[in-house]
Amino acid sequence: MPTFHSLRCRTAELRERLTISPLLLTVLTITFMFCVDNGTFWVIAADVFSGHLISLIGYMAALFLLTLAAFSLFAFPWTVKPFLISMLILAAMTSYYIDTLGIIIDRDMIQNIMVTTVSESRHLITAGYVTHGVIFGILPSLVVICVRIRPQRAVRAAVTPILTCVLSFALAAGLLMADLKSYSSILRERKDFMSSYQPGAPLVAAIRYAKMMSRSAELDLASTGTDAQTGAAYEAPQKPMLTIVVAGETARAQNFSLNGYDVDTNPELAQLPIINFSNAQSCGTATAVSLPCMFSKFSRDTYSYENGTSTENVLDVLGHAGLHVEWWDNNTGDKGIAARFKTRKFTDLNNSEFCSTGECMDGIFIEPLKDYISSITEDTVLVLHQMGSHGPTYYQRYPEDFERFKPACRSSEFKKCTPQEITNAYDNTIAYTDHILARIIGMLSADDRLATSLIYMSDHGESLGEHGLYLHGAPYFMAPETQTHVPMILWLSDAFKTRFGIDESCVAAQENNPLSHDNLFHSLLGLLNIDTAERNADLDIFSSCKTRVELAKI
């Protein structure tokens, strides 16, 4: 039998074998992440370098060395373990989402993560995610913790990481220069390639997000449309005006039967005198970008977070003109759009009918809206920010009696559902939005004291598994049309058309024209007869459809 002394000796030998330098531990950890956490990256690489094995080897060697150059700056005895553990956990977290849902973690996705709520994000913390994190993040981190760092002299411990960084960078540069033309072409044409590299892509995204937030923190708010004045439609005594702008959530145009979808997801709206704009595009693919962009004066090409947060939006212009403006929210907030107006939150209310899951269905708007409409005495614009079709828990976005398309996926882990079940659940959310919009239009049309109108436009679309992508938030350069093609609907009461001189047939003639979030700012001003130099007539879909009220010429 082994003696206590022999066991002690064996333990000491094992600890000695597990004693390595910080640099070797860094190399081994990078190798692990390179091979284990980059499934999507390797699939894309195989496609990009198909038939060019030597180029593939050269590029991967250069990328490995560049990663080593960056990581070696933390390869000091007192920093190496915390840094590598954080990288292992980060790579495990991000690799799960890109490998299972096709979600790329770029700057905009980091921004979306930072502004999301606990109730929203908890749906993404699934059993599969936790299991993946434990196997590929926690367990290798425990190995790093157990490894003993070999003692080094102070000078060597300080100099080795710096020399490794310089040498690795130089070797990587040499490898890339050997075929720079081909590599540059690949990076220009296949931006999805490096966007899938873990943990490099999310690290770069986090740095870009931090820089963006730092720049925007120093900006002052610039006024917009302070010259705004109400036009001729406000001169004589009139019925009070109420326009409701419904900011939809995650609704894609492809699943609206109004747009030719072969599933009847819009049975109620189809019976109403609405104008359906079938060819509208979003400004972004996630709420944190699209929502402020669609209310801003900037186009998709000129919008940035800095521009959006430092410049007043169309609600401010309406306020400058003297209209009463409010924002009601059943989502993750107004993103600063309504910072200067009265807001009302409907999330997580104590309502067993609509809020039993900790989030509220959009039916929560209906009863308060009835009372609100009956109380209107002044010209008002009300924005309703929906929960809409936000995933992955589509089945929680509608009451059980609205589960018309069956079987529907009732899990936040899509791998447990068939593609048809996922689509059925999503279609149920669209049908419920159809019902909510029809209910609101019904209430507006029933109140003959007011001149009423409604504009509905979704912030972005959704992927339901096409090409391996789920949910939304893909970088715009590679986003599929399902994430950027959004529904847009207009309804006008007779009293509204009369007061504001709208030729409905003229507006309807544009229903198949290319439109986008760029049009909302200018069209809302045109619809409501607000005169300001900020309104661009070319982007105002009502500018050529006025029968009585003459808009200011710009």
Image: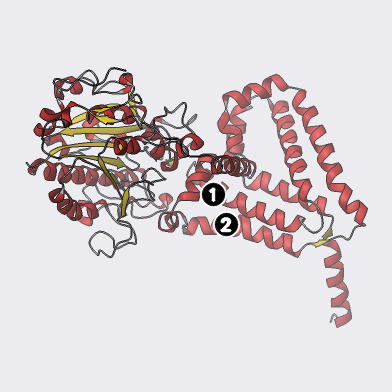
In this rendered view, identify the residue nearer to me: 237 or 127: 237
Contact between marks 1 and 2 (CB within 8 A): the answer is yes
Secondary structure under the numbered disc 2 in the rendered image: helix
Tell me if residue 495 comes above or below residue 364 in the rendering.
above
- Screen quadrant of the N terminus: bottom right
In this rendered view, identify the residue nearer to me: 468 or 382: 382
Question: Residue at label 1?
Answer: 96
Give the quadrant of residue 194.
Answer: top right
Where residue 153 appears, x then y in whole percent? 93, 57
| Residue 447 seen anywhere in this rendered image of the structure | yes
The colour scheme applied to this rendered structure is secondary structure
Q: Residue at x 86, y 76 (%)?
A: 8
Question: Residue at label 2?
Answer: 133
- Screen quadrant of the C terminus: top left
Q: Residues within 10 Å of mark 2 (few under 14, many from 20)?
A: many
Alpha carbons under labels 1 and 2: distance apart:
8 Å
Where residue 498 appears, x then y in whole percent? 10, 28
Q: Residue at x 41, y 32 (%)?
A: 283
Left or right side of 40 for 359: left
Left or right side of 346 for 490: left
Mark closer to the chain start, 1 or 2? 1
In this rendered view, identify the residue nearer to me: 194 or 326: 326
Give the quadrant of residue 117.
Answer: bottom left
